[in-house]
Image (cartoon, rainbow, N blue to C red):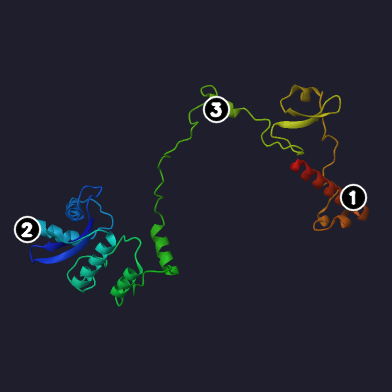
């Protein structure tokens, strides 16, 4: 059940606000009564979101004279669409004070929150608003900021500390103050993972490991702290191997394989790359 109400000023017996209410609100407070509570909260210094201060100050002026705001429910409807349409009609009839068209403290033409509006309602609302200028029409402070405005803002903020300066983080690190001796989680993460960052067939090894050759000539991966490295039991497969860029000069930059290695070797290198790519794709599919 929806209804349209009118708030009347008992000082001059003239309406000053029109709105729409609903029976059985979740807040258990009628919409028209909520305006009076909001006015009292405003006087107590509490912040109100998007408050209509003209309406609230009118209510406070009435309360200051030990009078009560007169509330009249002028129409009742089964759906909110009809209630909003009646609200729009009455606001247009009495006129808005902010547009210098009447007495009401309403800041809109009504009808806020309507859902599933019919085409007829859209046409009626469109005709009701025709000829009324937009609230931002003629304002010069809107739109992209000019260079002068940006410079003024920059100069005003210079030397001003950051709002977060000196504030402690709301979420301190989980391991703050913990050590390997006092926490199992820290001890677990402090042990290097030998498989981390290692890819099958990749020539590089994880940090802290080396690729070595055993006595039989097989490649093995061992930790840099392995005693067999210091004793010379294991031999590095990179030892005595020339660097991949050895013999290359800056003059080879931007040149093709044929220009650097010659036609025969360039053909072999290209064929080798093709075969290597084919093998890699075959391994991925398998």
Label 2 – label 3 distance at C-alpha? 70 Å
**Mark 2 in CB contact with mark 3 (< 8 angstroms):** no
* Foreground label between 2 and 3: 2
- Residue hosting label 1: 268
Label 3 – label 1 distance at C-alpha? 52 Å
Which residue appears at 25% of the width and 68% of the height?
A: 88
Q: Who comes first in sequence, dot 3 or dot 1?
A: 3
Whether residue 8 is visible here, answered yes or no, is yes
- Residue hosting label 3: 186
* Foreground label between 3 and 1: 1
- Assign the N terminus to one quadrant of the image: bottom left
Sort mark 2 into few (<14), some (14-19) or many (20+) by Cα contacts within 10 Å. Answer: few
Q: Is residue 167 above or below residue 96?
A: above
Quadrant of the image occupied by residue 93: bottom left
Which residue appears at 54% of the width and 24% of the height?
A: 184
- Assign the C terminus to one quadrant of the image: top right
| The one of 252 and 223 positioned closer to us in this rendering | 223
- Residue hosting label 2: 65
Q: Who comes first in sequence, dot 2 or dot 3?
A: 2
x, y (%) of residue 209?
Answer: 72, 31
């Amino acid at each position: 059940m929806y209804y349209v109400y009118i708030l009347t000023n008992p000082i001059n017996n003239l309406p000053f606000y029109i709105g729409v209410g609903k029976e059985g609100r979740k807040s258990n407070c009628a919409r028209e009564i909520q305006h009076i509570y909001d006015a009292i909260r405003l006087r107590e210094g509490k912040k109100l979101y998007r408050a209509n201060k003209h309406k609230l100050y009118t209510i406070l002026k009435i309360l200051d004279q030990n009078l009560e705001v007169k509330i009249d429910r002028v129409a009742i409807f089964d759906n909110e669409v009809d209630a909003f349409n009646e609200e729009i009609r009455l606001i247009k009839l009495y006129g808005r004070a902010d547009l210098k068209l009447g007495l009401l403290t309403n800041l809109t033409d009504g009808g806020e929150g309507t859902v599933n509006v019919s085409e007829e309602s859209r046409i009626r609302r469109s005709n009701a608003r025709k000829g009324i200028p937009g609230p931002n029409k003629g304002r010069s402070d809107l739109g992209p900021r000019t260079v002068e405005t940006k410079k003024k803002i920059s100069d005003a903020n210079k030397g001003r500390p950051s709002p977060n300066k000196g504030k402690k983080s709301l979420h301190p690190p989980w391991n703050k103050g913990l050590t390997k001796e006092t926490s199992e989680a820290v001890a677990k993460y402090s042990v290097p993972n030998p498989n981390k960052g290692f890819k099958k067939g990749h020539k590089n090894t994880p940090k802290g490991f080396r690729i070595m050759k055993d006595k039989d000539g097989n490649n093995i991966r061992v930790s840099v702290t392995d005693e067999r490295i210091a004793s010379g039991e294991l031999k590095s497969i990179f030892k005595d191997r020339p660097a991949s860029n050895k013999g290359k000069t800056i003059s080879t930059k931007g040149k093709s394989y044929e220009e650097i290695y010659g036609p025969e070797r360039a053909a072999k290198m290209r064929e080798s790359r093709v075969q290597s790519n084919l093998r890699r794709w075959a391994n991925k599919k398998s």
